[in-house]
Every structure is written in structure tokens, then in C-alpha cells.
Image (spheres, helix red, strand yellow):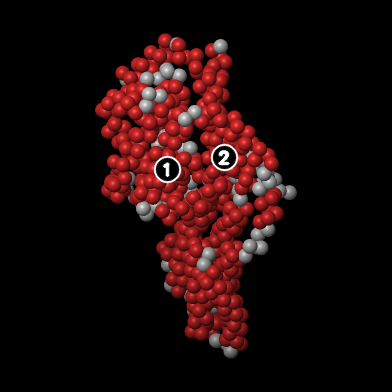
Amino acid sequence: MGSVMILSVIGGMGLLLYGMYIMSEALQKIAGHRLRDALGSIAQNRVLSLIMGALITVLFQSSTATTVILVGLVNATIITLKQTLGIILGADIGTAVTAQLIALKVTEIALPVVGFGAIIIFFAKRDKYRRIGQAFLGFGLLFLGLKIMADAMSPLRDSPFFTNLFLHMSDNPLLAIFTAAVFTFLVHSSAATIGIMMVLAMQGMLPLVSAIYLIYGANIGTSFTAVLSSLSSTREAQRVAAAHVIFKVAGVLLFLPFSIPFAKLLASVSSDPGFQVANAHTFFNIAIAVIFLPFTNYFAVFLEKILPAKKGFTGEPIYLDDSLIGTPSIAIGLALKEVIYISDNALNMLKEVKMVLESYSADRAESILKLENRVDQHTLATRYYLTRILRNALSREDFTRCLRLINIVNELEKIGDVIEKDLLYLAESKEINNAKFSEEGKRELELMYNNIYKLANMVNNIIMTNDSRTTYEALCLQEEITDLEFRSRISHIQRLSKGISESENSSAIHLELINAYLRIGQHLFQIIEIANDPEILDTKNMHDFYTGDNIFDAAVPKQVTKQ
């Protein structure tokens, strides 16, 4: 009997956690970039942020998932620290909805919901509808797991050992808080912990005061996952995770001295043990939101002081967050920010190299080499990050965005290579050989460079905004550069035929400079095509090749071998 009970509890817990996982995965893919855009647009208003945080957490059934997404959005500078604080407080309220649903005995309809979700998955043809079915399936499995655990633990209500254990927690609040915090951190879900508490309370095994202490711990434990996800992120993202922890700990410290009066208040509101636990969780999080929401601006300043900005370049990716690879639309947004960072560095290299060509300096050349090394490091990390995103089951839109970013980052790396291997080499050769350009040749090279630099700025803007007007201007400029390259070669040959000494002495360097500028222009033109031409990548066939129809594709990386 005991072994059957233990296996049932473990199995129920597994269904609960897996149900939460697949429901969260499906809803994040359904929401996709709309969620990111919505958060970015309403984050200015604290009250709307609170409501949005609650709604998102109701969908994802996890304040941890919401906070991890916020860490990624802040990491990508889509929203700021101040704007996230209201969403975090709302996310904590959203977790209470699951508890209220459990109290309303939604567990009794778990099996029909599982069946409904399964029917949609197996009969729907489009990914969009199958993900809706996956969300229903996850929702049903979540409550089915709770029902299995409730039925398995019902005999324990007559056990003196468990009765004394939970009564003992009323006398040791710190132990209860610590235990619940650790357990919640391990299962990555306060909703799961609260659900188990409610099952125990409805079985008559968990006194209300002990449940309140466990609720405190569950609320603290749910914030630790976001802390771990932010460790390798920007300082701003780390502040978001720290805010979640501090809100929870501060709320517990405020409530702890009043736990017994709080329990009496809850008992007077409802006599049902399940509702008492659900209401305790709900009231606690609403109270925290009401208390802290007016002071979010001051709180942001406090976080900036205790977690000051990092200094110096570490060589690590700035915006990429491994914990969000399972949320492709947001992960691709982070990758885009990293690509923009790479583009900025490539543009700085192009700016610096002009001064080296005009007047060679070993220190300035070394600075360009460091920039090139930075471009290589971030290119490698971004390419690897994007290929890992491709292992998810992606929509065609996200798949196309991913491939485009991979191709853009490859072109940026090639631009860096041209600057390092060709332009710096030519600058050094010019210095060693004391080569001088003719006045006319110098003007032509300067005009060629200025057009290339102008084009690079336009391309940088196109990567960020994909602005159609800038794209048109860049394409026109590319035609001018091609024409200028041809005319520059003819002019140089005419000067050679006239026997101009400067042109003769610098001829090889002059022509190689034109070639290098032209190659940079061609790579820039490739980026414009990749960013704007839907036919540049055969995305339909590639999407069908890389993505399958299995509903568990999001959880299982694909192994693709190309011959």
C-alpha cells in the first residue's frame, strides 16, 4: 500500500510539472512576438503593467516563466528595469489564479480537458491549432496530476506522524519557510507547491497557520530560478531577478509577525480549507503589489545602487540568454540585439581604419585588431545561439528570421576579415614603402571610402529597423559605388599612361584598396538582400526539412545530418 501511494504521488507530481511545461511552451509559442511587443508597449503604465503581468502568468501558470522572460527582454533592452517592476508584481498575483481554480474543484474536469486537447492535436493540420490543443492538454494534465496526488494522499489524513509533522511546522515558521522555498526552487513552480499544500489542506492534514508559513517559502523559492537565469546576463537583467527576490522577502518579513491574525482573518472569510490556502496566497501577493507598486521608481534607483553597472569588455555575449532559447520569438529578439552590437563594432573598425590608412599608427592598428577579435567572438557565439534556436519547433516566420540573422552575421564577420587582412595590411605596406597617392587618386579613394562608410551606416540602420526608405537609398548608393569603382580604375590607368610618378609607385596598393572597398560593398549589399528579399533563402523547403510535425518537437532537439 505504501509503495503504491509513493508511486502515485511521484506520478502525479510528474504529470503536474509536465502539464505546466507543455502548456507554458505552447502558450509562449502562440503568443510569440506579440507578447514581446505588448510588454514593450504597455510597460510605461504601472497599473497596466501589473494587469499584464497577472494575465501572462495566468496563461503560463508560472511567475518564474514570466520573470525569466522579463530578464530576457531587459537583457535585450526592449524594456527597462523600472518598467518591469509592475509586471513582476502582477506576475505574483497571477499565480493565485491556479490556486483558486484548484479550490473550485477544477481537478474534476481534468480528464475531459486532456481528451479535448488530444483530439485537437491529432486532428488539426496547422501548427497554430495544434499548439492550442497542446495548451489544453497541458492544462488538463496539470490538474489530473493534482487529482492523482489528492487521491493517493487521502489515507494519510489518519496518520498521526503526518498530523504531528505539519502541526510542528506551526511552531517552527523559519523551518517551514526554508523547506517550502527549497522545494519550490527544485520544481521551478510556486503553483505546484501551492497546489500540493491545498491537496493536503483539503485532506485535513495541513493546519492553516502551517500552510501560511509554507506559502511564504513557496513565494520566496519561486524567485530563485530567475536569479540563476540572470547570472550570465547584463547587469540590468540581474536587477530584474533581484527585484523579484527582494519583493518576496520583504513581503514575507512584513507578513510574518501577523501570521496568526492573518490565519484568523482567512478562517472568517471561508471555512473551506482549500479556499483558505488559496486566499492566503492571493491576499499575500495582492498586498505586496499594493504596498510596493507606488514606490517602484525609488526601488529601481535602490537596485541600481546595490548592483552597479559592470565595467570593461569581457568577450562574452552581451544580450544572449540561454534560458530563453526555448522561447524562440524572444530569443531571436536577443540575437538581433547581438547582431546589431556586432554591426556597430564592424562599423567602428571601418571608421578607425581610415585614420590608419592616412597616417599609420601601430597602436591604432592594434585597437582595430581588438575590435576584429571582438566581432569574431560575438559572431561565433551568436551563430551557435541561433543554430540552437533552430532546434526548436519554429513557425515559418521565426525560422526565416533565424536564418536571415545567421547569414547577416556571417557577412559582418567577412567585412571584419577584409578590414583586418586587407586594409590593415595595405596601410602597413603603404607606410613601409613610403607610398604616396597622387592628389587625384587620393580624392577618388576618399570618395570611394566615404560612400562605403555611408553605405555601412545605412546597412546598420536596416539591420535595426528594416526601413524601406533606407533600403532604397542604400541600393541606389550601391549602384553609385559600382560605377565609381569602374571610373576610378580607368582614371588610375590614365594617370599611369601619363607617367605620374606617385601613381606608378603606389599603383598596387591603390588598386588593392579599390578591390577591398568593393568587397566590403558587396558584403554590405548581401546584407541588404538577406534582410529584404524573401526569395534570398529557400525558407519554405528548409523549414519543412528542419521542422517536423511531432507535438514534442519543442522539447526534443533535432539531429540533422546533411550529405
Residue 14, position as x, y percentages in the image: 55, 28
Q: How many marks?
A: 2
At a point 65% along the width and 59% down the height, the residue shown is: 537
Residue 137, position as x, y percentages in the image: 59, 36
**Mark 1: few/some/many CA within 10 Å (<14, 14-19, 20+):** many
- In the displayed image of the protein, which residue is found farthest to the bottom? 498
Reply above or below: 53 against 190: below
Reply above or below: 184 against 156: below
The quarter holding residue 558 reads top right
Residue 122, position as x, y percentages in the image: 68, 39
Q: Which mark is residue 281?
A: none
Q: Looking at the image, which is closer to me, 431 or 351?
A: 351
**Mark 2: few/some/many CA within 10 Å (<14, 14-19, 20+):** many
Q: Secondary structure at mark 1?
A: helix
Instruction: State the quadrant of the N terminus.
Output: top right
Choose the circle earlier in sequence order: 2 or 1.
Answer: 1
At a point 54% along the width and 84% down the height, the residue shown is: 501
At a point 56% along the width and 46% down the height, the residue shown is: 29
Callout 2 amino acid: Ala
Q: Looking at the image, which is closer to me, 242 or 249?
A: 249
Residue 420, position as x, y percentages in the image: 52, 63
What residue does disc 1 label? 54
What residue does disc 2 label? 135
